[in-house]
Image (cartoon, grey):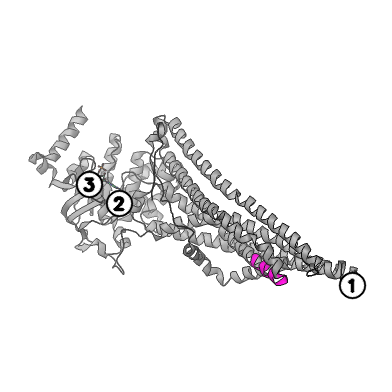
Amino acid sequence: MSEQHTARGDNRERFIYKDDEIIEKPFNWSQLGRLFQYMKPYSKQLLPLVIVTMVLGTATRLAVPAIIIMAIDEAISPKNGETSLTKLYMYAGLMLLLYVIQWAANTYRIKYTSLIGQRVIFDLRQDLFRHIQKLSFRFFDKRPAGSVLVRVTNDVNALQDLFTNGVVNLLMDCVQLIGIIVILLLWNFKLGAAVMITVPLMFIVSGALRRRIRFAWQDVRMKQSRINAHLNEAIQGMKVTQAYTQEKANFSFFNHVNNTNIKAWNKASALNQAFGPIIEITSAIGTLILFWYGSHLIQAEVITVGVLVGFANYVGNFWDPINRLGQMYAQLLVAMASSERIFEFIDEKPTVVEQHEADKLASIRGDVKFDSIVFEYEKGRPALKGITLDVKAGQTIALVGHTGSGKSTIMNLLCRFYDPVEGAVLIDGIDIRNVSIESLRSQVGIVLQDTFIFSGSIRDNIRYGRLNASDDDVVKAATAVDAHDFIMNLPDGYDTQVQERGNILSMGQRQLLSFARALLADPRVLILDEATASIDTETELKIQEALKTLLKGRTSFIVAHRLSTIRNADRIVVLDHGVIVEQGNHEELIRHGGTYNGLIEAQYRFLSA
Ligand SMILES: Nc1ncnc2c1ncn2[C@@H]1O[C@H](COP(=O)(O)OP(=O)(O)OP(=O)(O)O)[C@@H](O)[C@H]1O
């Protein structure tokens, strides 16, 4: 189920967030099993150590009350009346020894469980990231980047506690509980049963509460996800926000999502706290029963004082793990909700899939054919309605048309970011669905309008096109597109560090850099989404020259905005609402006097206005 969130009555209405899916499944054991599969690789190495230390720790803890009983019944107040200091020292020494073993076992257990926990989290994060990289554009179309981020960070972190301490503490508490139950029932069945009669009652009373806690923690996760999604968007759009002085409105919305998160957290936490009193009351009733019934049994000489004291000790130890389990229930729920969200991503199948044992696309010549392509992003809203286009190797094709006419969509299909609903894209006569995606994309280069610059040096950014390129090749590529001079003028030349998105570079410089990157990659087919931003004439000329170098000898598709680029193209393809309405070279289309002629006239009118 998904929920549309709109705050009403104020500026918040401008922001509409589509919430992450609420996962309504109840506590899911198969999920837990799947999670534990991640421990498998370490089970041989580390698990035996964890089990040994866990058993030692629990056994020594359970042995202490038994020694107290023996100390009372045999050394302090024995039946024959002869108190024995020697025996008392012996039992005290034994207890000391048990405490030392317990301490050592706990220390090592924590060490080993943290090791396993860290490795499991590492593996899970790797798996998730590897998988996310495989997912198709359709997946990212549906989700705000913030919500993807949350799953790799927060959701994986939420499992960290579970794996480092939670699981072993849970096991230890369960073993301790079972141990105590067995000891009490064996020692004196009637007294043991009387004390524990309150346990099932407690479970019945807390049943409804547990259900509410589960939903409350899911709600917390969703609210956090919303904060992250908003933060991500707000930071990315910061310039626009500041330019339109929308900081107040933006803050007001952040305040709103932040508040709802706190409220959800407080609610979940309060529900969680409600466990405490339930357990305390049950524990008090159990203790009352113990002393009331226990003193009867002492009077009837069925049990000794030592046994009653020992029972009291065990019963004290009995409620501790139950209380902890109650607290852990919340942690477990958070972990379950997170793991469901993580597995939901891991289970997401890429929509663009490689055929089983798909062949590698051999070195291509560069003939490209779009054969009766129909495509829709959303069912029932076709973006391309039957595109047929035959391009010979080495030709330059300019795609023009009004905004939203389908130019970028054609390019997306050629890179196989999406698959067509009908028809096929062929390179050298081979349907691109029949070859491996890597072999296809390594031969089809793409230069996007919004050039992405990664954090790192200028050199690394150019080398992103071909990671094994030598420094010399990088300089050659930069020189060929006339980027060398401006790079040498930067503080550290090719080693100048640029931040994510390349803030220190101008639009034109970023474009030249992306040309150098594409040239280095040297693809046979090149797709270029020309930047629309107006730049000075000198840079424009530089870019045109660089473009000539870049296009030489390759099949090129240019989503063209500049007149000079369009004029030089071998063929111009004019799109309108997902259909090719005209094609030919500049002169032919001008003579034809159709849509293209209209676009050009409009551009001249605009320029001379
Ligand atoms: N990810 C998407 N999800 C849903 N619809 C989309 C998506 N991307 C594009 N569209 C729709 O598909 C149609 C074609 O879009 P496309 O991006 O191909 O146009 P374009 O010609 O490249 O436009 P522009 O010149 O503005 O970049 C448009 O109606 C657009 O709204």
Disc 3, disc 1: CB below 8 Å? no
Q: Mark 1, residues whose alpha carbon is within 10 Å: few (<14), some, or many (≥20)? A: few
- For marks 3 and 1, give the CA distance: 100 Å
The structure residue drawn at horizontal position 68% and vertical position 64%, both measured from the top left corner, is 194
Residue 183 is inside the magenta segment: yes
> In the figure, is residue 403 to the left or right of 293?
left
Q: Residue 406 carries which label?
A: 3
Asked whether mark 3 and ligand 1 are closer than 8 Å, the reply comes as yes
| Number of numbered discs on residues | 3
Disc 2, disc 1: CB below 8 Å? no
Task: Give the structural element (helix, strand or loop) at label 1.
Answer: loop
Task: Give the structural element (helix, strand or loop) at label 3.
Answer: loop
Rendering quadrant holding ligand 1:
top left
* Marks 3, 1: nearer the viewer: 1
Q: Is residue 321 visible?
A: yes
Q: Is the magenta stretch mostly helix, strand or loop?
A: helix
| Amino acid type indicated by mark 1 | Asn
Q: Is residue 492 visible?
A: no
x and y, in percent, of residue 298 in the image = 80, 66
> In the figure, is residue 427 to the left or right of 93?
left
In the picture of the structure, the residue carrying the numbered disc 1 is: 80
| Amino acid type indicated by mark 2 | Ile
* Marks 2, 3: nearer the viewer: 3
Earlier-in-chain disc, 2 versus 3: 3
In the picture of the structure, the residue carrying the numbered disc 2 is: 446
- Viewer-side residue, 408 vs 121: 121
- For marks 2 and 1, give the CA distance: 95 Å
From which residue to which does the magenta span run? 177-188
Residue 470 is inside the magenta segment: no
The structure residue drawn at horizontal position 53% and vertical position 51%, both measured from the top left corner, is 213
- For marks 2 and 3, give the CA distance: 17 Å
Earlier-in-chain disc, 3 versus 1: 1
